[in-house]
């Protein structure tokens, strides 16, 4: 068992290291281009491995919050990735049962995370749980309103999911490695920096989309 846990740890570190650099690489190349897709796919794969290995380790050692952080990061990475396949929801398509089930399960898990954080006074757990509840809830509401989506909604979800997953991964790294930052700030500083970036990027996308629509009307 110790050998497996050691292998799991090194695999987690390697995947986290790759993901740490792949997200910025995907952001700073032409969106939709070959390199953007390539770096994004590598980032997604790295987050799947990092999240899965974190869940295994946290489950074995009983590290409840790190377990929840791993689930949070993995869920958001999946949310960002699946958005690429849900563009038809802006044209009358319907979300597959898989996406309904995933979002529903996520809502249950994040409600539990929020309740856990409030019960034990764990601020980061409450914050991440609240964000997760809002994300999964908006997903389910969006699936129910398929056909009324804005054309760029899939892209907004893609940005939210991948960048949110990156923020969660950096939070977990900070909590386990940056010991000089006191709790709960070691968990929260990536969110303080990262989520305003997500909001800014989404507004930028909306602004470009509105500008393109206005140009097409002229």
Image (spheres, rainbow, N blue to C red):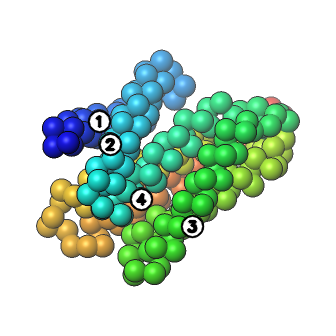
Q: Give neighbour class at mark 4: few <14, some 14-19, many 20+ (Cα, 10 Å).
A: many
Indicate the position of residue 176 as horizontal and vertical percent values: 22, 58
Label drawn at residue 68: 4
Left or right relative to 36: residue 189: left
For the residue pair 4 and 75, the one nearer the viewer reads as 4
Mark 2 near mark 4, Cβ–Cβ under 8 Å? no
Whether residue 213 is visible here, answered yes or no, is: no
Mark 1 near mark 2, Cβ–Cβ under 8 Å? yes
Indicate the position of residue 118 as horizontal and vertical percent values: 47, 79
Left or right relative to 11: residue 105: right
Q: CA distance from mark 3 to mark 2?
A: 23 Å
Which picture quadrant has residue 117? bottom left
Q: Reading the chain from its start, which is encountered first: label 4 or label 1?
A: 1
Q: Reading the chain from its start, which is encountered first: label 4 or label 3?
A: 4
In the image, which is nearer the foreground, mark 4 or mark 1?
4
* Residue located beneath label 2 in the image: 53
Q: Reading the chain from its start, which is encountered first: label 2 or label 4?
A: 2
* Residue located beneath label 1 in the image: 15
Q: CA distance from mark 4 to mark 1?
A: 18 Å
Q: Reading the chain from its start, which is encountered first: label 1 or label 3?
A: 1
Q: Secondary structure at mark 2?
A: helix
Q: Residue at x 53, y 67 (%)?
A: 112
The quarter of the picture where the C terminus appears is top right
Q: Secondary structure at mark 1?
A: helix
Q: Residue at x 44, y 30 (%)?
A: 40
* Residue located beneath label 3 in the image: 111
Whether residue 202 is visible here, answered yes or no, is: yes
Q: Residue at x 66, y 53 (%)?
A: 104
Q: Secondary structure at mark 3?
A: helix
Q: Reading the chain from its start, which is encountered first: label 3 or label 2?
A: 2
């Amino acid at each position: 068992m110790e050998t497996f846990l050691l292998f799991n740890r090194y695999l987690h570190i390697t995947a986290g290291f790759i993901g740490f650099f792949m997200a910025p690489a995907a952001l700073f190349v032409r969106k939709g281009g070959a390199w953007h897709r390539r770096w994004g796919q590598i980032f997604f794969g790295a987050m799947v491995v990092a999240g899965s290995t974190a869940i295994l380790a946290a489950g074995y050692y009983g590290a409840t919050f790190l377990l929840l952080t791993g689930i949070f990061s993995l869920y958001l990475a999946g949310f960002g990735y699946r958005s690429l396949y849900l563009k038809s929801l802006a044209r009358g398509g319907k979300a597959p049962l898989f996406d309904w089930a995933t979002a529903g399960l996520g809502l249950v898990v994040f409600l539990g995370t929020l309740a856990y954080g409030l019960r034990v006074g764990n601020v980061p757990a409450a914050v991440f749980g609240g964000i997760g509840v809002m994300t999964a809830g908006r997903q389910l509401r969006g699936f129910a309103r398929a056909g009324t989506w804005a054309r760029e909604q899939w892209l907004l979800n893609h940005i939210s999911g991948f960048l949110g997953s990156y923020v969660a991964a950096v939070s977990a790294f900070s909590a386990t490695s940056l010991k000089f930052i006191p709790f709960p700030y070691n968990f929260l500083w990536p969110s303080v920096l990262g989520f305003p970036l997500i909001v800014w990027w989404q507004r930028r996308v909306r602004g470009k989309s509105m500008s393109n629509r206005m140009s097409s009307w002229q």
